Amino acid sequence: MKTDATPEDVRRVAQEVEAAGLRAVVIRGDYQTVIGPVGDERRLDFDRLAALPGVKEAARVEAPYKLISREYARFFGEPGAHKTVAIRDVHIGNGEPVIIAGPCAVESRQQIMRMAEAVKHAGAHVLRGGVFKPRSSVHSFQGIGAAGIHDAEEALGWLKEAGDAFDLPVVTEVRGESMVELVGKHVDLMHIGARNMYDQDLLVQVAQQGKPVLLKRHFGASIEELLSFSEYIAAEGNKDIILCERGIVPVGKGKSYTRYTLDLAAIPVIHQETYLPVIVDPSHGTGRRDLIFDMSCAAISAGADGLMIESHYNPAEALVDGAQMVTPDELKDIIEACRTLYRARKGLRRNAGT
Ligand code: PEP
Ligand code: MN
């Protein structure tokens, strides 16, 4: 209320709130009175309240996401703790870290077959490989699937074949609405890339495929936006959502030492806000092969439920993102270190909450 609001103004607002079926809690300060409606805020017309005499401001205080919120979990039949999402028989959330690994892009049948064997041997659980690549330049390689439907089906088939051969569920990015069904037919986990995090129509369509969804944080998005947009998927009745921190735009002028700035504090924050699993992509997050080991360890130490790491048997000859891809041997060391750190953290945090 405004500082000069009269007791009659306060009464009037409280009456309006109660008429809508909510309780009006009136808090009187030295200078100002605040009226807090308790109940289903959707029943209130905030514009109407704002126009009443003596009102300074009328605003919703509820979070823009509820379905995926830890706080509201019990109202929607979700466990209050951590949700486990199944990618076929790989379970992520509240357990050993799940490693998604593979090349940035599927380049050939031979390449993805060889990488499937390599990442399996290194200890990874899910095979990645982009069939459609989001690129800043139209003149660069757009992914093998971008050339046409025939190539897309063929490349998705190779990915699936490679996954099946080494008992690895597979994930690839859905770059646009026209590809949703096709990708949905071939993969076990549907990946929405950072650039598409804000595309609510794509989110809704992907959610409707009934497969788990990997949603990456846009490099300019706040954590609240990432959670709000994941709510679009949950609102379709699909709560098998894995969130991914992959770095935000670095500050400062000139050449940055890393491709993005990996926001590791996002992990515990997201865990506090939602029961959904959260993973980290140190590959796009740094853009540098020499930083992947350390940032993977840091992510697991901060409580990440898994990692998405780009790997190639010969990064120098990769068509995309060679500078950030680790070799399968490096991947194996990273996975072993992360297992050790996960167990150490679990032991150390026994008395310190989540
Ligand atoms: C990717 O994982 O292949 C990718 C392009 O990542 P991002 O959307 O985070 O840039
Ligand atoms: Mn990449």
Image (cartoon, rainbow, N blue to C red):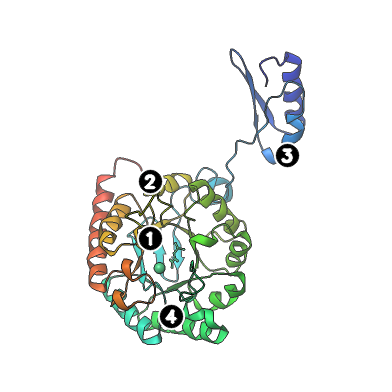
- Kindly identify the amino acid type of the residue bearing the numbered disc 1: Asp
- In the image as oriented, which residue stretches furthest toward the top? 30
Q: Quadrant of residue 179?
A: bottom right
Pointer 1 residue: 281
Q: Residue 97 placed where, x, y %?
A: 33, 60
Check residue 159 in the rendering and tell me which mark sits there, or answer none.
4
- x, y percentage for residue 227? 52, 50
Mark 4 nearby-residue class (10 Å; few <14, some 14–19, many ≥20): many
Q: CB of mark 2 within 8 Å of CB of mark 3? A: no
Q: Nearer the viewer, mark 4 or mark 1?
A: 1
Residue drawn at 29 percent across, 40 percent down:
351
Labels 2 and 1: the sequence-earlier one? 2
* Residue 265, numbered label: 2
Q: Quadrant of residue 287?
A: bottom left
Badge 2 or badge 3: first in the primary sequence: 3
Mark closer to the chain start, 4 or 3: 3
Callout 3, which amino acid?
Arg
Mark 2 falls on what kind of element?
loop
Counting other residues with Cα less than 10 Å from the Cα at mark 2, is it few (<14), some (14-19), or many (20 or more)?
Answer: few
Task: Report the image quarter containing ligand 2.
Answer: bottom left
